[in-house]
Amino acid sequence: MTEIKTEDGNVRVRMAPSPTGFLHIGGARTALFNWLFAKHHNGEFILRIDDTDTARSTDESMQEIFDALKWLGINWDKQYVQSERRNVYDKYVSQLLDSGNAYHCYCTPEELEEIRAQARADKQPRSYDRRHRNLTPEDVARFVTEGRKPTVRIKMPDTPIHVNDLILGSLNIDPATLEDEVIVRSNGIPNYNLTSIVDDAEMQITHVIRGTEHLNNTPKQIAIANALDLKLPQFAHIPLVLDDSGRKLSKRHHGDLVAVNRYREQGYLPEAMLNFVARLGWSYDDKQEIFSVDELIEKFDLARVGKSGSVFDIKKLEWLNSHYINQLDVASRTDAVIPFWEQEGLVDSDTDRDWLEKIVEAVGERLTTFQGILLQTRYFFTDDFEYDAKAVKKWWGSSDEKKQRAREILTNLGQILEKIPTFDLETVETAIWKYTDENDIKRVAAMQTMRIALTGTSFGPSLFDIVVLLGKDEVLKRIEKAITYL
């Protein structure tokens, strides 16, 4: 069990997403780990919107983050927006400048690029040479006269910075690798490393649980906190989420594959996504894969979070989602798939609900997502489909002889079904099997030949369910169409 060290005994954690796009799977995992940690310790989970990047932050992105978290069932106790807290940050910047722990830097963009280029050429770990650390009043006056707008840089210490990470262990950061970080841009907007650690202190955050991509920010934030004499939270850096080739899962390389709302739109259940995300880097034992939310809250512990990256396995997510879909009754599954049918214009408010439920029941446990209902059932609503080429070649054949055989089977089955007085499951099945057995026709050959005629595919629900649900007139029409095609 992770040791909890707080003065008042209350755990407070936070998530600080930037509203510059959709909620990333990794961001959802960060939110979930923080939320589970807070719930486990009866603490508070704070949502803090980091919108200090004014050029890229949008209200639409902020709302999408809200929607994604709410869909997952991750609710927050308090909410803050950093752009509304400028006066708080300005106070701390003034304190840093007055104490000599920060300074104004008047370097132009061109000068900074020259400095960076020289650092690269000299293979220096720092990309800024601290040239404006000790400006004279005359230097400042000259730069002001030239109309230069300064940034504010923190003076990084020349001694190692120690990070005691709850997951990665004890780390000592070489000061030679740290440059004087810009904490306020030339437009006066404070940047992430300042606002983050100031807010952590102001909001009494006890634990900062975030991805290892933020590990390089941690010593900078510790330096800022030390310069301001602020109490530090405990840090825990969770492993990266990787694709199956071992590359970091990112918006840049993977597009909307990493967007939480993409999965919502495709018909994944929040329970499945929550269970899946929880297992990205955390495990309880080697056996249990499926956890309820209450179980996750009860069992979650940072000590069981690994140090290595965790692979985003879409097949595992599909398996989990299929499990949760199959826990629903037919009525609930029908409610969930109707919007996908409606979006495709396949059903409307007048479509018989009982018939739709029977279709869903026939599909059975084949759905991995609710959107998958379209592939499984489109042919129930329209005969405007193409015959799958591979299925046609395998079961109808490519030679004249095989095509003629397929025509004979379809013709005979059509005549048999036309004469059936009661078009129910038992009667249809009995009639078809009687035909195949008496004529020494392999059942699978007859079934697949007819399935392609009715659906265009070689897979799906039971053929007998399809026949009965389509009804006699539609079945006979589609058989005739297939015979003409052949």
Image: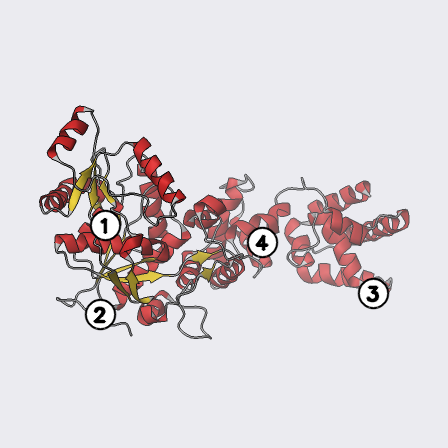
Pointer 3: residues within 10 angstroms few (<14), some, or many (20+)?
few
Distance from the alpha carbon under mark 4 to that under mark 1: 53 Å
Q: CA distance from mark 1 to mark 3?
A: 75 Å
Determine which residue is flagged by label 1.
196
- Say whether disc 1 or disc 3 marks the residue closer to the N-terminus: 1
Nearer the observer: mark 2 or 3; the answer is 2
Q: Secondary structure at mark 1?
A: helix
Q: Give the spatial CA distance, label 4 vs label 2.
A: 53 Å
Residue at the location (15% across, 53% down)? 227
Circle 2: residue type? Ile
Q: Are marks 1 and 2 in contact (CB under 8 Å)?
A: no
**Which numbered disc covers residue 4?**
2
Give the quarter of the figure containing the N terminus.
Answer: bottom left
| Residue that carries the numbered disc 3 in the rendered image | 437
Tell me the kind of residue under disc 3: Asp
Q: Residue at x 20, y 25 (%)?
A: 147
Give me the C-alpha separation between circle 3 and circle 4: 28 Å
The first of marks 2 and 3 along the sequence is: 2
Return the residue at label 4: 359
The quadrant in which residue 367 appears is: bottom right
Q: Earlier in the sequence, mark 1 or mark 2?
A: 2
